[in-house]
Amino acid sequence: MSIEPGQLHKTLFACVYYAALRPEEAADLRLTNCTLPDAGWGLIVLEKARPQGTKRWTNSGETHESRNLKHRADKETREIPIPPVLVTMLREHITEYGTAADGRVFHTGTGGTYSSSAHSYIWQEARKLALTPAQFASSLAARPYDLRHAAVSLWLNAGVPAVEVAKRAGHSVDVLLRVYAKCVDGQQEHINGKINEALNE
């Protein structure tokens, strides 16, 4: 089966944005990790990541190898509720392209894993189409990983408690507050309004 990289990456990038997956986590996402109902929110239960390394540093001798989640103990998982838009995209993607023999959702036509350079190339091509020349030349959304930053920033700005955002993103609360301090600082007016509403009830 032939799979155009751009077709695969559309849904992979959506997982990075809507679920704040790290790209290497999306690369190892399996059908068994996904609850994809016909309507409403779904769920991803992450078990492994698939970072790219050099063959000499992997047990299998391959450039991609399943590993434990970052900052997680062996067999520890991470649950991420996913919005209906991502549920639909994943359902359609799996219907169209199936899964690899080991159940991975994102795979090449031969069941392999796309390299980080392929991710970067497709992302830059997408940026050319979506951005003005000046924006493309800037650092705006320069890497696929920036979609993850956008997801976490969106959640914080929407008023999701920092503890819940950290849980979904796979961060400690300390790291979350340090990296995304500007988002939290920017919520003061919103938070004050919430407190006012509670006081006036």
Image: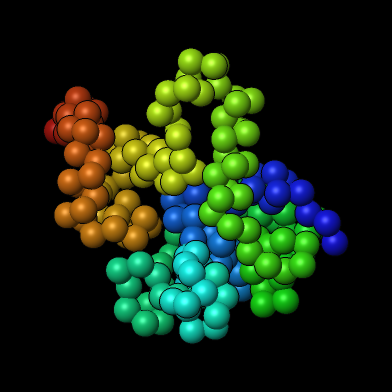
31 sits to left or right of 109: left
What residue do we see at 65% from left, 44% from top? 10
92 sits to left or right of 28: right
> x, y (%) of residue 108?
72, 61
Q: Is residue 19 visible?
A: no
> x, y (%) of residue 84?
59, 47
Q: Nearer the viewer, residue 58 or 87?
A: 58
Which quarter of the rendering shows the C terminus? top left
> x, y (%) of residue 46?
48, 68
Q: Is residue 125 visible?
A: yes
Most extreme residue toward the right is 1
What residue do we see at 55% from left, 22% from top? 131
Q: Nearer the viewer, residue 80 or 70?
A: 70
> x, y (%) of residue 68?
41, 75
Q: In the rendered view, would you say 98 is above or below 19?
A: below
What residue do we see at 56% from left, 62% from top? 27
Which quarter of the rendering shows the N terminus? bottom right
140 sits to left or right of 132: left
